[in-house]
Amino acid sequence: MSSAIAFENVVKHYRGAGARSLRDELAGVVRRDRPKRVVRALDGISFDIPEGEACALLGANGAGKTTALKLATRIAYPTSGTVRVRGRVGALIEVGSGMHPELTGRENVLLYGRILGLSRADVARRFDEIVEFAEVGPAIDQPVKQYSSGMQLRLGFAVAAHLEPDVLIVDEAIAVGDAGFQLRCVERMSKLVREGRTLVFVSHNTNAVETLCSRAVMLRQGEVVLDGPAPEVVAAYLDSFAQARLERQADHAALGSPLEILRTSLHDASGREVDEIASGEPLTVRLHYRAARPLERPIVNVGLADPRIGCFTTASMARDGGSPELLVGEGSIDVTFAELPLLPRVYEVWAGGRSGVGVGAILDWQRLRLFRVVDERERQGKTAVTATQNSGPVLIPYAWSFGGRDEG
């Protein structure tokens, strides 16, 4: 199968000294030896996308995704290396891309079609469908510069996706549209993929990536770091953010209160200290404390939290009667969660405490550390990887069954 798009050892560097004052510019007229900063947007990337394949480009902001798309659409050219594109290309890389602001929407549709090599009759045959999808109504005969950003986006995508491109290239631009428009975009792109068109899709919406794409390429600092089936690359992409968050966490001590937490450690079933735990396994949270003074019948609460929704479970000495008579000096408090029926992602440990003899708070409720739940079981189905990250955290065992048709 021939390639629709091929990158062969492509390098793209931008040269510039960054923001400069007027004084710097005037000085530069006299002194031309100021070294220019080189931004390495792409650094020797190679991959090809066969005709009819739906491929996503993933990566953090600044990874080089949009630069790669601009090279594929000839908006920019590589510093070195070769980019080959086969067939007509429809592209939406930013809001208003491909639209001339002084022309009306109707004139822009006709111009875009002619650029793609379509006859006036070909464009006219698709015109009503484009206007209906874009939902611009009578504004189709107004200059595009009078459109809102949302109207420009809808028209730009409608034109790019309805004039039968061989290759459709879509950047994160659709993310600025409303939920209904995003859904229609995904449905339209799915239809084009089923028809055998080539799709190159850049998005931070991994749910859409898993739905649309069979393959993904992950970029980091202008280099290809992973290329493979979309679910595997999406999992690695999400894991990279989780790992970065864990690496940034400080060993948070809660000092200055009657009950000071010097350190919080996590332990598996064997007592080994860990930073991650398998889903379904027991977890012990150990608070290494120092009591600034003797604390009578302290009541300590430890919670597990998803950062998006807050605490979803709490172990409380007030509820279970586990409060000791007295805490003195330094020691540790353990609470063991018998099992963690949690989906894989990064969670938080929170704790707080008060005295059971009316003294009040001895430890303000606060986050103490992060930990990660992992699950190596195979993920199947579209959006399976993303679903584990975006759905509720608790996994309750369940089973499917199917009955016969009810004849009653």
Image (spheres, rainbow, N blue to C red):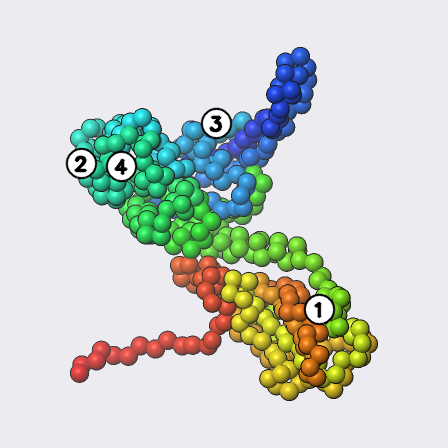
Question: Which residue corresponds to the image point at 45% horizontal and 53% vertical from the top-left?
Answer: 206
Q: Which secondary structure lies at badge 2? A: helix
Label 4 vs 2, first from the N-terminus: 2
> Could you give the CA–CA distance between mark 2 and mark 1, rounded to whole angstroms?
67 Å
> Could you give the CA–CA distance between mark 3 and mark 4, rounded to whole angstroms?
25 Å
Amino acid type at circle 2 is Arg
Packing grade of label 2 (10 A; few <14, some 14-19, many >=20) is few
According to the picture, the residue beneath numbered tag 1 turns out to be: 264
Are circles 2 and 1 on residues that touch, CB within 8 Å? no
Along the horizontal axis of the image, is 207 left or right of 192? right
Amino acid type at circle 1 is Thr
Mark 1 or 4, closer to the camera: 1
Q: Quadrant of residue 367?
A: bottom right
Mark 2 or 1, closer to the camera: 1
Question: Which residue corresponds to the image point at 70% horizontal and 58% vertical from the top-left?
Answer: 250
Residue at the top extreme of this rendering: 30
Question: Which residue corresponds to the image point at 53% horizontal and 55% vertical from the top-left?
Answer: 238
According to the picture, the residue beneath numbered tag 3 turns out to be: 77
Quadrant where the N terminus is found in the figure = top left
Q: Which secondary structure lies at badge 3? A: loop
Residue at the right extreme of this rendering: 329
Quick check: can you spot residue 352?
yes
Are circles 1 and 3 on residues that touch, CB within 8 Å? no
According to the picture, the residue beneath numbered tag 2 turns out to be: 125
Label 1 vs 4, first from the N-terminus: 4
